[in-house]
Image (cartoon, rainbow, N blue to C red):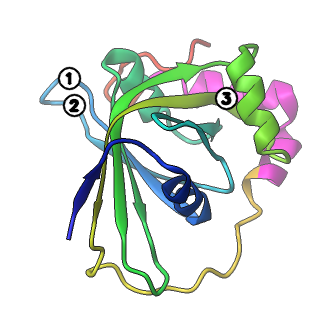
Amino acid sequence: MGKVFESIDEGLAAWLAEQHVFFVATAPLSSDGHINVSPRGTDSLSVLDDHTVAWLDLTGSGAETIAHLTENGRICLMFCSFDARPRIVRLHGRGRVVLPGDELFARVESEHPGHVGARAVIVVDVTRVADACGWGVPIMEFVEERDVMRPWAEKKGPEGIARYQAQKNARSIDGLPALAP
């Protein structure tokens, strides 16, 4: 059954990289605020070291993760194996937002070429690594990545992306600040 690991070793790092999707959970401090769970994928995850992961955060319709991390830093990533080997891995930690212009942003962006419209890199300082059996997760077949975000961002162009972020990514659904316009 489940096991807690000291760190992300090479084997686990390779397994994480093989997963086509992972889920990000964050929440505001307010009990009235909305808990957020978001899927991530599209070859965006980097394991930086045995206690640090990061992903290239592409422009989206909301900015809940960014707002929650800016407010309190709490985050959990969940990876599920949908192939024959059942497994769930959760990475708990403290997250932070790294913006374009920072060396770490450039590093993670260079590890995942071809993406357009990245608004941030989310870095997680992992404090707990645990797995679970995953017996309740169905076996599913990966077909392909969706090629929707890149053409969308290319069509908008840098100025259009900036306008979109100012309109849609400045605040969370609970009114917390996210990306500065």
* Residue 171 left/right relative to 55: left
Quarter of image, res 118: top right
Q: CA gap, disc 1 to disc 3? A: 24 Å
The answer to the question of whether label 1 and label 2 lie on touching residues, with beta carbons closer than 8 A, is yes
**Helix, strand or loop for disc 3:** strand
Label 2 sits on residue: 33
Kindly identify the residue that appears in the image at 71 percent across and 75 percent down: 144
The label shown at residue 55 is none
Circle 1 Cα neighbour tier, 10 Å, few/some/many (<14 / 14–19 / ≥20) = few
Q: Which residues are magenta?
A: 150-171
Task: Tell me the crowding category of disc 3: few under 14, some 14 to 19, or many 20 or more residues within 10 angstroms, Cα based.
Answer: many
Q: Which mark is residue 119?
A: 3
Outermost residue, left direction? 31
Asked if residue 169 is among those painted magenta in the image, a careful observer would answer: yes
Going by the numbered disc 1, the residue's amino acid type is Leu
Instruction: Confirm whether residue 34 shows in the render.
Output: yes
- Under mark 3, the amino acid is Arg
* Side (left or right) of 8 relative to 44: left
Of the two numbered discs 1 and 3 on the same chain, state the one appearing first in sequence: 1
Give residue 115's position: percent from left, percent from top: 79, 45
Q: Which mark is residue 29?
A: 1
